Amino acid sequence: MNKPLLTSLALAACCAAAFAQTPKLPLESNDEGSIYVSPNLSPTEKAATANGGTLGLQRKDGSGVYGGMDTSGTRPNYSLGASTGGDVSFSAGAHTDGKDNKGVKAGVTIRY
């Protein structure tokens, strides 16, 4: 296989992984939006272990709120956040383990 083709395939695989999102399983859905759960799973050869998850509300315009817990580390990590909808969407969130690990994140998504 020649190097440019191999490089292109590797770059495409990296981009696909970067845009992948965790699956959101809807609990209830109607015309206004949906309530979803997104489990944090660690798969093995024969089973999958649940290490917490996220519960959220997503509206049809893209706005929403979420809150969750991740128990895969030595201490549980709690998170919450929200986002606005529309073509220019603002988002903010925070996470903490109740001790040393804490942080805030914010972002802007522009859809065109």
Image (spheres, helix red, strand yellow):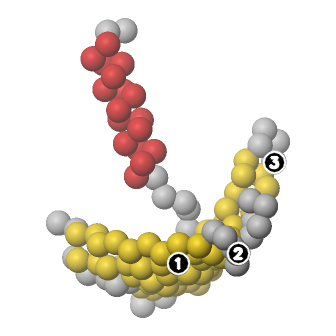
Identify the residue under disc 3: 47
Disc 2 from disc 1: Cα separation: 14 Å
Badges 2 and 3: C-beta atoms under 8 Å apart? Answer: no
Amino acid bearing label 2: Lys
Identify the residue under disc 1: 94
Instruction: Identify the mark nearer the N-term, 2 or 3.
Output: 3
Mark whose residue sits in front, 2 or 3: 2
> In this view of the protein, can residue 37 be seen by the observer?
no
* Residue drawn at point x = 59 percent, y = 73 percent: 102
Instruction: Identify the mark nearer the N-term, 2 or 1.
Output: 1
* Residue drawn at point x = 82 percent, y = 42 percent: 46
Camera-nearest residue between 78 and 12: 78
* Numbered tag placed on residue 60 in the rendering: none
Camera-nearest residue between 69 and 30: 69
Identify the residue under disc 2: 99
Mark whose residue sits in front, 1 or 3: 1
List x then y, in percent, for residue 47. Answer: 81, 48
Image quarter where the N terminus lies is top left
Mark whose residue sits in front, 2 or 1: 2
**Numbered disc 2: secondary structure:** loop
**Numbered disc 1: secondary structure:** strand
Disc 2 from disc 3: Cα separation: 32 Å
- Residue that extends furthest to the bottom in the rendered view of this protein: 32
List x then y, in percent, for residue 37. Answer: 62, 74
Camera-nearest residue between 28 and 99: 99
Instruction: Identify the mark nearer the N-term, 1 or 3.
Output: 3
Camera-nearest residue between 25 and 77: 77
Amino acid bearing label 3: Ala
Q: Give the image quarter of residue 8.
A: top left
Q: Give the image quarter of residue 78.
A: bottom right
